[in-house]
Amino acid sequence: MKNIAIGGFFHESNSFNPIITPKEDFLIFEDDEIHTQGQNYLQAQGIVDFFEDKKDCRLIPLVFARAVPNGLVEEALYLKLKKRFFELLDSAPRPDIFVLALHGSMRVQNIGSAESDLLESIKTRYPDLPIVCGLDMHATITQKMLNCANAMVGYKTAPHLDAWETGQHAARIAWKILFENMKPQMAAVKLPYLIAGEKSETDYPPMKDLISELCELEKQDDVCAASYLLGFPWADADENGVTALVVTKNEKSKAAEYANLLANKFSELKSQFSFSVPAYPPEEALRLALSENIRPIFVSDSGDNPTAGSTADNTNIIALLSGILKEKTRGKKIVVAGIFDPHAVTFCKANLGKKITLNVGGYFDTMYCQPVELSGTPVKLLEGFGPFRSDLILFRTTEFDLIITSKHIGFTSLDMFKALKIDYMQKNVIVVKLGYLTEDFKDIAAKSFLALTRGCTDEVLSRLDYTNKYELL
């Protein structure tokens, strides 16, 4: 019987965001809870599903924790999660292998890379045991991660649609180590580039072509995994950047050869990366959207994208819609999703259905915006929405409807609109705090624009104050 230890911490940590991500932002579960919570952590679920029906395999589930990207993770929280990880490990049969579902760009107060710290701690305690990691495409690969892990594989889609498949991929590598006596060899080449996800969607060249290269390479008998790990551009970390990484079955020199080929290919195409949709300053993007006669038109408030770790309370868009673009909103049906403001949610709850004046947003992001005063009515309340159990308020003004959330969550699917009974197909303009649109939104968008707003996830990377030197693509 082979014992497979599984677990994972999944968070994309934005060093330009002043919020310190607390326990309340995380979905945390452990041990056998993976069997009921796995749908909220698809990469981990992929690992579980692979091994669950395999004879001679026993899963040892440890700790799983994931949150919507935000600022650095609270040090005390991470240390508590890590302590529990090893407590569960100590009370279980000795593992034969670790298969971890990680992000790769989780950063902790006073510690730095969480993945480096966790892997180093595992390797110190179990120096002879192999470690296989699944990673997000935007993982930041450190030398410590390379020193400690035996194999790593990243997502191949952006927007990310293959989290479960990546978990399966990591599990297959682990299976070959355990039962086919494979000795994986890993090599990586670091490139000093930073690139936003909105310039590297995998449905568009050159990223589409680069992913095809990975898939072709993985068809070779001697290759277990090939990945481009793009790093995370909104973290000012010294080991940030793009990594070409290859895992071969037994031959280190082949892994190095393939990794160099991938790195060279990326460098050859670096000048071709560009936004996949029209991108404009926010006022211009809104004017263009409001002038269209088709619907719904999507506008991404890209500088305040919580799924890339922004504060989610930047007010630039609503300031424009309620200010200098006010006349342009006449006769238009507009919804803005949304603003993270727990204080505004509390105030709206106490005044549901009443006409009120509300100060909203600008509490966390004090660098790029300030609170906006709106007059309107909180017309709907939805409590406990989604896996993070956020309360939602639909606040109606003369110019637009605004979704206000009590928790720092993403605006990524139609579920939120459906839950609030918003007739989204009849909206002229839908503003979402996102970068590239998710599949839900792509499917219904008549047209979309990227608003290049200033914020913690500024798409114009040169406007951010990096202390480390990178080549910004």
Image (cartoon, rainbow, N blue to C red):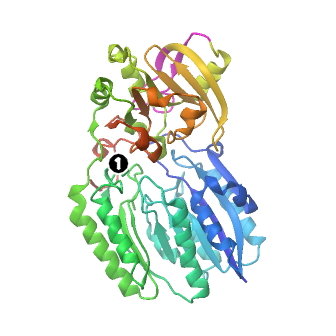
| 336 displayed left or right of 381 | left
| Residue at the image point whose x is 63% and y is 19% from the top | 347
Identify the residue position indicated by label 1 in the image: 198
Q: Which residues are magenta?
A: 354-374
Residue 417 higher or lower than 205, as above or below: above
> Badge 1: how crowded within 10 Å, few (<14), some, or many (20+)?
many
Question: Which quadrant of the structure image shows residue 44?
Answer: bottom right
Q: What secondary structure is the stretch in magenta mostly built from?
A: loop
Residue 1 higher or lower than 347, as above or below: below
* Visible residue check, residue 276: yes
| 162 displayed left or right of 457 | right
Where residue 86 appears, x then y in whole percent? 70, 67
Where residue 453 appears, x then y in whole percent? 34, 34
| Residue at the image point whose x is 27% and y is 59% from the top | 206
Dot 1 falls on a residue whose secondary structure is: helix
| Residue at the image point whose x is 36% and y is 22% from the top | 320
Extreme-right residue of the structure? 91
Question: Which quadrant of the structure image shows residue 270?
Answer: bottom left
Q: What number of labels is visible?
A: 1
Amino acid type of the residue that numbered disc 1 sits on in the rendered structure: Glu
Give whichever of 372, 294 is nearer the camera. 294
Residue 68 higher or lower than 115, as above or below: above
Where residue 164 appears, x then y in whole percent? 55, 62
Q: Is residue 367 magenta?
A: yes
| 316 displayed left or right of 28 | left
Where residue 240 appears, x then y in whole percent? 39, 59
| Residue at the image point whose x is 24% and y is 65% from the top | 267
* Visible residue check, residue 189: no
